[in-house]
Image (cartoon, grey):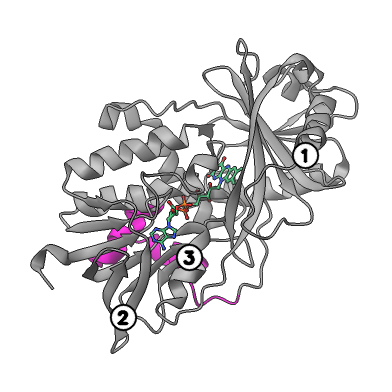
């Protein structure tokens, strides 16, 4: 094999994780190759994300990682000179029944113990933050002022440009088709066009992570779950935070929406039961279901016209937490998979974390984070705020 085809790290998939990882690895001085099936970056699940970024999770690993991602997203323009449409709009989880009130207040205790500054606001105080919420039945809700949103496409493209400037090599239209394993190490990575080798191979193939794992004999419990989203025409800004309603209803467990800095309302629903599979054709049931729920909670939305719907894949794990760690038994195979419904927000912090793993240069908190995300865990728990 020519020296051209030898790398320190090969990244499979230029998505929410692979592209930031390419930048951080290249910035650490490593020779990086990114192999991607399609013609440009961010075209898998990344561009289907609605752009929500929050640290308000229910476990220390995602809280810690997303706090770091928020630092990166919120200073991206100053640090890198690129506008990714970051907006520190906050998140508000609303409660219309005692069930949600209890869930949210219990979670606040955990979240505060990990340093989050979100709070519970009784009805009248919450209405000062979100005046257009339906008042009838409203008990209150949480508000986390430091959460926000950004553009997944702009962010991914910004990381791509930055990674290229540092010498990372992206090869598009080159799906990985096979890998050879010898002595518990990946020796070569083959695509339709060529064969490569590297000290480390990072699986960041999103919904295709399991298929990539099989090429090395490693089983990865990730499967695709299909979610729909939509965007309206732009209107003058009237809505501050991302609104999340966790009341289950026929066909959905929760839904969330926010107003982008450019005026559009962007929204999404979590289907119930899960829509397992890789179908990304829009359905006729999504829009009537989510629109009715949104107008109930915020009647002011009823005159805004929807411009487009789309559907994409959550790469789900059995417990709703990502899988990040060295695979066993293939020792140079690093997994950054199963990012579920939070891969866009986790991408930057995970990109830094995998870089520290490759460099064997972990920070004190990393061991705890990696324990939560370990490929070897039993997958028995269940994420509370999916
Ligand atoms: C409707 C919707 C809304 C969402 N909203 C949010 C949100 O608000 N905030 C948030 O954080 N997350 C959100 N998500 C989730 C987020 O999009 C995913 O978690 C994230 O994009 C997964 O990142 P990834 O890097 O694992 O995969 P991807 O971004 O899909 O990247 C994987 C890449 O691997 C490539 N690939 C696959 N197979 C191969 C192969 N054989 N060889 C080479 N390349 C290959 C693919 O082409 C793809 O580009 C949303 C998802 C959906 C569907």
- Secondary element at tag 3: helix
- Residue ID at (53%, 59%): 207
Name the image quarter holding the N terminus. Answer: bottom left
Residue 313: image x %, image y %?
59, 52
Magenta residues, start to end: 350-378
Numbered badge on residue 180: 2
- Secondary element at tag 2: strand
Q: Which sits earlier in the primary sequence, circle 3 or circle 2?
A: 2
The relative height of residue 265 versus residue 188 in the rendered view (above or below) is above
- Residue ID at (85%, 22%): 135
Left or right: 307, with 180 as reference point: right
The relative height of residue 146 versus residue 336 in the rendered view (above or below) is above
Using the image as rendered, state which of residue 140 and residue 257 is in the foreground: 257
Mark 2 sits near ligand 1, with its Cβ under 8 Å away: no
Numbered badge on residue 284: 1
How far apart are the two marked residues, 3 and 2, measured between alpha carbons?
A: 17 Å
Q: Nearer the viewer, mark 1 or mark 3?
A: 1
- Residue ID at (29%, 71%): 189
How far apart are the two marked residues, 1 and 3, measured between alpha carbons?
A: 29 Å
Residue 363 seen in the figure: no
Left or right: 340, with 194 as reference point: right
Mark 3 sits near ligand 1, with its Cβ under 8 Å away: yes
Q: Which sits earlier in the primary sequence, circle 1 or circle 3?
A: 3
Label 1 neighbour load within 10 Å: few <14, some 14-19, many 20+: few
Using the image as rendered, state which of residue 351 and residue 168 is in the foreground: 168
- Secondary element at tag 1: loop
Q: Which sits earlier in the primary sequence, circle 1 or circle 2?
A: 2
Residue to which mark 3 is pinned:
209
369 falls in the magenta region: yes
């Amino acid at each position: 094999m020519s020296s051209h085809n030898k790398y320190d790290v090969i990244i499979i998939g230029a998505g929410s994780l692979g592209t930031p990882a390419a930048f951080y690895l290249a910035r650490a001085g490593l020779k990086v190759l990114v192999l991607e099936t399609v013609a440009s970056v961010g075209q898998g699940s990344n561009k289907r994300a609605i752009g929500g970024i929050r640290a308000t999770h229910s476990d220390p690993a995602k809280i810690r990682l997303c706090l770091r991602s928020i630092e990166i997203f919120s200073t991206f323009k100053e640090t890198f000179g690129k506008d990714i449409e970051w907006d520190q709009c906050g998140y508000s989880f609303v409660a219309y029944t005692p069930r949600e009130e209890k869930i949210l207040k219990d979670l606040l205790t955990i979240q505060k113990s990990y340093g989050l500054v979100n709070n519970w606001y009784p009805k009248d105080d919450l209405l000062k933050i979100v005046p257009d919420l339906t008042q009838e039945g409203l008990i209150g809700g949480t508000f986390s002022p430091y959460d926000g949103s950004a553009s997944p496409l702009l962010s991914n493209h910004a990381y791509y440009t930055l990674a290229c400037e540092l010498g990372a090599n992206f090869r598009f239209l080159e799906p990985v088709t096979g890998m050879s394993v010898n002595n518990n190490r990946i020796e070569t990575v083959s695509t339709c066009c060529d064969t490569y080798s590297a000290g480390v191979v990072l699986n960041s193939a999103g919904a295709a992570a399991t298929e990539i794992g099989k090429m090395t004999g490693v089983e990865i419990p990730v499967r695709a779950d299909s979610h729909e989203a939509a965007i309206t025409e732009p209107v003058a800004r009237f809505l501050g935070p991302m609104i999340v309603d966790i009341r289950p209803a026929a066909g959905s467990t929760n839904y969330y929406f926010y107003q982008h800095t450019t005026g559009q309302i962007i929204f999404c629903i979590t289907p119930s039961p899960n829509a397992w599979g890789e179908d990304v054709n829009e359905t006729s049931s999504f829009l009537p279901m989510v629109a009715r729920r949104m107008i109930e909670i915020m009647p002011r939305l009823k005159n805004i016209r929807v411009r487009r719907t789309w559907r994409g894949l959550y790469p789900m794990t059995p417990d709703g937490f990502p899988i990040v760690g060295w695979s066993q038994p293939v020792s140079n195979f690093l997994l950054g998979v199963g990012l579920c419904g939070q891969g866009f927000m986790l991408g930057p912090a995970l990109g830094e974390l995998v870089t520290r793993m490759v460099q064997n240069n972990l920070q004190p908190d990393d061991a705890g984070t990696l324990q939560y995300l370990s490929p070897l865990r039993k997958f028995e728990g269940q994420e509370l705020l999916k």
